[in-house]
Image (spheres, rainbow, N blue to C red):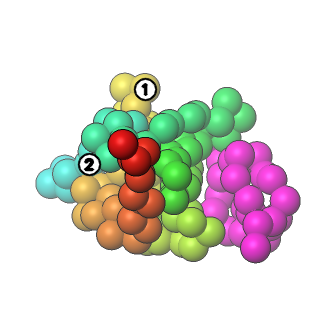
Amino acid sequence: MRHARSCCGVGLTAAALLLAGCTRQKTIELTPGVPFTDVLEVGRQLGMTAQRDPVSQAVILSDAANQVVICPGTAVALVNDRFVDLGRPAQYHEGRLIVPVEGLKRVTGSLKPRPLRRRGRT
């Protein structure tokens, strides 16, 4: 069941929006020794389309089967209407939204397989 649209551009209830902290814009410094990766680059590698919400600065990745929302300053991602722990908050660094590599592995592990495309019969 989809909920009403929120400022993040996806279905969330008001309570879930507050929990996710999508209305906060926060940039924090990188933690030494913790590898982070660019959300948009990983989305491109997975063949997902990407949008950035101009108000919340959240990044929304989507394909035929999945929708992923990552908001800066939060340590959770919304993957197909379920929260996935990132371990540390997503943050903007040099204009790019980055997340811990370990957290992104949990996000990609929560993705549904894309439906197979059937070719027309010849």
Q: Which mark is residue 95?
A: 1
In this picture, which residue range is highlighted in magenta? 1-28
- Outermost residue on the left side: it is 33
Q: CA distance from mark 2 to mark 1?
A: 14 Å
Q: Is residue 28 left or right of residue 38?
A: right
Looking at the picture, how far across and down is residue 58, in whole percent? 58, 43
User: Would you identify the image quadrant in which residue 107 lies?
Assistant: bottom left
Q: Which of the two residues, 96 or 114, is positioned nearer the viewer here?
A: 114
Residue at 49% from the left image edge and 48% from the top image edge: 63
Q: Which mark is residue 36?
A: 2
Can you say whether 37 is above or below 106 in the image? above
Residue at 40% from the left image edge and 31% from the top image edge: 96
Q: Is residue 122 left or right of residue 35?
A: right
**Residue 51 can be seen in this image:** yes
Can you say whether 48 is above or below 52 in the image? below
Q: Which of the two residues, 109 or 21, is positioned nearer the viewer here?
A: 109
Is residue 26 highlighted in magenta? yes
Q: Which of the two residues, 117 or 88, is positioned nearer the viewer here?
A: 117
Residue at 67% from the left image edge and 40% from the top image edge: 56
Residue at 25% from the left image edge and 56% from the top image edge: 101
Looking at the picture, how far across and down is residue 102, in whole percent? 25, 64
Looking at the picture, how far across and down is residue 82, in whole percent? 57, 73
Report the amino acid beneath label 2.
Phe
Considering the image in quadrants, where does the C terminus appear?
top left
- Say whether marks 2 and 1 touch (CB < 8 Å): no
